[in-house]
Image (tube, helix red, strand yellow):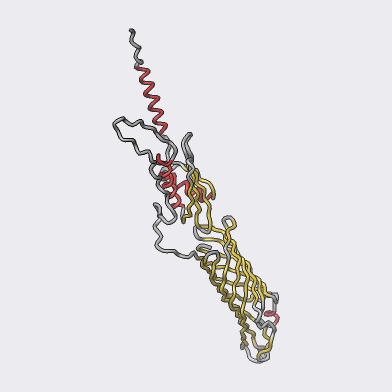
Amino acid sequence: MPRANPIPSWGRLALLLMLGASEARGGECAPAVVLSGDATLVSELATLLQSNGVATQAAPDCPVAQAKLSLRAGEIDLDLSDGFGRSHSRTVSSTKTAAALIESWLTVSAAPENHAASTTIEPRPDAPAPNTTPAPAPSPPTRDAPVRGESAPTHAVAPARAAFLLEASVANDGSLWGAATLRGCVRLGPVCGGGLVRGAEDTRVGGDAPRHDSERIAADVLLTIGLPTQLGSATFSPGIGAGLNWVHITSRLPSKVEAGAIVDDDSASPALELFADLSWPIAQGLAFDVRLAAQAAPLSHTDTFFDEGVIVAGAPWGRVFGGFGLSYGTP
């Protein structure tokens, strides 16, 4: 019986090369994630991931994870998914933490026990049957579990925000005022409770003060409560404040009575203020604020009056404010 011709040496070499190429293709798939969402966050995070050896573009025929980024109230919302139907959402404080979480996610997602691929092994007759129960998949990091690059939380801190603003206002008597305002609040569930302190000065452009040679300064101290609402990347916060309005008025005595002497009076009233704040994030925790407000002080002494023979301007009972400034923290 004739013997079969053996495979030529060049044929064996070609077969080995094909098998080697097949095995090499199986190991070509490096960790990769495609980023989408906020352009600034995507650019910064891509740089961090690439420096750690994580590709941000998938190689042909290789699985790839998806990561969507958005900025909300100074923090980063991260939504992850992969080609095996797994997904996870997390809010983190920085792109460094987001990069560490993505690397951890890719490691878990790439584990063989976490996707559908499997290999069937025929047991030997004398060997015990293999355990076919799949091993539990490692759980992705949760919000309470720290990931690499993020320290474990020690205690809960209520989010807070403080702001400094420059304002201009028009009063009911037609006067124009300039003001500096410091405000702050602490998040209490859906609302933000805090306070406001404002100092203002009549510019003597319009109103009663220039007509009666008077000068006026004012101060407000209010307790406030706002309702922050997300509008895309900005935060809109309408609210109300209540407290005290104080106005100090000075007028000069005529030179024929007493040169250089002045008369001063004060007016104080409860005040109610409605406001609307709009904040745009410009850096981590820092935002540009615009503010509109309307205030009423119904018990102010609004009428002009005589004091030591001098006509003194009254205090306005209402003002409308507009201003801008910077805030820091979580709205």
Whole-percent x, y for residue 293 in the image: 63, 69
At 38% from the left edge and 38% from the top edge, which residue is drawn? 132
At 44% from the left edge and 55% from the top edge, which residue is drawn? 143
In the image, is residue 261 above or below residue 164? below
- Is residue 274 found left or right of 189 in the rendered image? right
Whole-percent x, y for residue 291 in the image: 61, 66
Whole-percent x, y for residue 17 in the image: 38, 24
- Which part of the image, by quadrant, shows the N terminus? top left
Between 10 and 289, which is closer to the camera in this rendering?
Answer: 10
In the image, is residue 285 above or below residue 65? below
Whole-percent x, y for residue 178 in the image: 62, 72
Between 281 and 314, which is closer to the camera in this rendering?
Answer: 281
At 41% from the left edge and 55% from the top edge, which residue is drawn? 145
| Figure disc tally | 0
Q: Residue furthest left?
A: 126
At 39% from the left edge and 33% from the top edge, which residue is drawn? 119
Between 84 and 126, which is closer to the camera in this rendering?
Answer: 126
- Examine the image and state in which quarter residue 205 appears: bottom right
